[in-house]
Image (cartoon, rainbow, N blue to C red):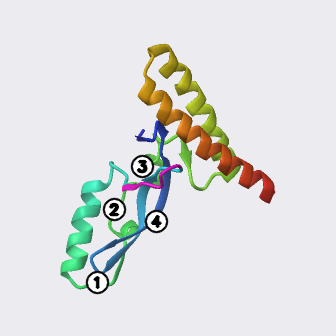
Amino acid sequence: MSFCCGASMVGSKGTLKHYRTQVHNVPLLFCPVCHRVEVHYRVENEYEILAEYAHGDGADHVDFQDYVMEDEETIFENVVNRESEDDLEVVQSQIDMSLDLLAVAKWMQDEKWQSELKRRLAVMSQRRIRLQQKA
């Protein structure tokens, strides 16, 4: 499980650009608060190798799934939420988790962590309001 801004990151697949080569269907982790994106650690080395070879061959596009055999369920087995889930459920899950962590941070008297979690909760609460207004 990967963390950012005080709680868990969301699992997804997406396209990354490596110089002029676009690598599609790369397993990613992203933070729903600060929008940081990183290649899932279980396939990070494979991504680097594939991207370098594709760029060296002058390929404009390459599909990660064509070269890496590990299935999506195995890669994302340790993430709390996935982008394919309902947006409102993901946001609510992130809020619940942050509230649980905030209780721990208060118990530990960790002011910095409390501050990070409160910022995350504010962002997630605003996102939940927007999603509820759309529905």
The image shows residue 61 at horizontal and vertical percentages of 36, 80
Mark 4 residue type: Gly
> Label 1 neighbourhood size at 10 Å, few (<14), some (14-19), many (20+)?
some
Q: Is residue 116 magenta?
A: no
* Secondary element type, mark 2: loop
Mark 1 residue type: Ala
Q: Which mark is residue 14?
A: 4
Which residue is pictured at 62% across the width and 37% down the height?
A: 95
Q: How far apart are marks 4 and 3 (CA)?
A: 14 Å
Q: Which of marks 1 and 2 is nearer the N terminus?
A: 1
Mark 2 residue type: Val
* Secondary element type, mark 1: loop
Instruction: Give the camera-side residue of 117 and 64.
Output: 117
Q: Residues in magenta?
A: 33-38
Q: Do the residues labelled 2 and 4 touch (CB within 8 Å)?
A: no
The image shows residue 113 at horizontal and vertical percentages of 44, 29
Q: Which of marks 3 and 1 is nearer the N terminus?
A: 1
Q: Residue 48 carries which label?
A: none
Q: Distance between the residues labelled 1 and 4?
A: 18 Å
Q: Name the residue beneath numbered marker 1.
A: 59
Q: Are marks 1 and 2 in contact (CB under 8 Å)?
A: no
Classify residue 2 by image quadrant. top left
Q: Name the residue beneath numbered marker 3.
A: 75
Instruction: Give the camera-side residue of 84 and 105.
Output: 105
Q: Name the residue beneath numbered marker 2.
A: 68
31 is higher (above) or lower (below) than 18: above
Q: Distance between the residues labelled 1 and 2?
A: 17 Å
